[in-house]
Amino acid sequence: MVKVKDVFQYLKDLAPLELKIEGDNPGFLVGSEEQEVERVLVALDITPEVIDEGAEWGAGLIVSHHPVIYSRLSSVTDNDYTGVRVLKLAGLGMAAICMHTNLDIAEGGVNDALAERIGLQDISVIADTSLSPCGDRGVCRMGSAPNEMRIEEFAEHVARSLGGNGVKYLPGKSPVRKVAVGGGSCGGDLPLVVRAGCDTFVTSEVKHGQILEAQWYGINLIDAGHFATEDVICPVLVRLLRERFKSLEVKKSERMGDLMRYIGV
């Protein structure tokens, strides 16, 4: 029988915890490592709805990208969002493993999955010396576009590839050729992307000042949404866990989706 600690060790092998960005809290966060599990639910976030889904399906473990506990807890009560979820998990006897920025940075992780999903070729790491002085690590990835195209065409391609509710984009000065991706909120990496020679950056939650900065650089910018740019890792985790643990039933949550609604003009 597979135990929680077996799944945790495998995930640590895929995305070592030492890769995490300072202040992050990935890891085994709720439950007992000795607990035996037969079903694992994978989701971008552990919400009350996802926990209910797991309980109804008989999952003993939820694996997520975003940590269910992010900062230090001084109490666990039902008066805040973190406490509600931790209590719900514990009450149902469900464990939680969350792999966050370590999975963003790891080879084959979130950003490799994002680059592959939108069809980039010759994918490589954009080195960030603040994460590793020797320059062998980075959150963002870069690669060649499937073919040279206008930003309008590429934005539509990204929207279709990610299956979200649409994207926002800023036209730059060049056609789309060399593309950087950073799932989640990576607007702060814009200077790294420019220095890497990319003409296009796909990320999300771009701040107003970062949009102005991108315009000044003349780079194409696509904001494809936090959920859409990171949920791409969930099917990958499902596949990897199924391949590694043949006796486990593993599936992606059907109740975790982009909660925002969009209106066009």
Image (cartoon, rainbow, N blue to C red):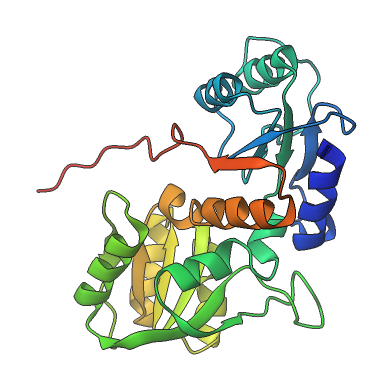
At x 81%, y 26%, the residue is 31
| Quadrant in which residue 41 is drawn | top right
- The part of the image, by quadrant, that contains residue 233 is bottom right
The one nearer the camera, 40 or 96, is 40
Q: Residue at x 72, y 24 (%)?
A: 94
Q: Is residue 229 above or below residue 29?
A: below
From the viewer's perspective, tell me whether residue 145 is left or right of residue 35. Answer: left
Q: Name the residue at the right extreme.
A: 34
Residue 11 to residue 5: above or below:
below
Residue 176 appears in the picture as rendered: no
State the count of labels.
Answer: 0
Residue 164 horizontal side relative to residue 56, left or right: left
The structure residue drawn at horizontal position 33% and vertical position 37%, both measured from the top left corner, is 260
Q: Position of residue 175 (x, y in %)?
A: 27, 87
Residue 228, relative to residue 155: is it above or below?
above
Camera sees residue 80: yes
If the image is split into quadrants, where does the N terminus sit?
top right
In the depicted view, which residue is nearer to us: 53 or 153?
A: 53
| Residue 7: percent from left, percent from top | 79, 46
Q: Position of residue 159 (x, y in %)?
A: 29, 61
Direction from residue 126 to residue 231 in the image, left or right: left
Q: Which residue extends farthest front?
A: 247
Q: Residue at x 32, y 51 (%)?
A: 164
Residue 191, given in percent of the width and then of the height, sits at: 53, 76
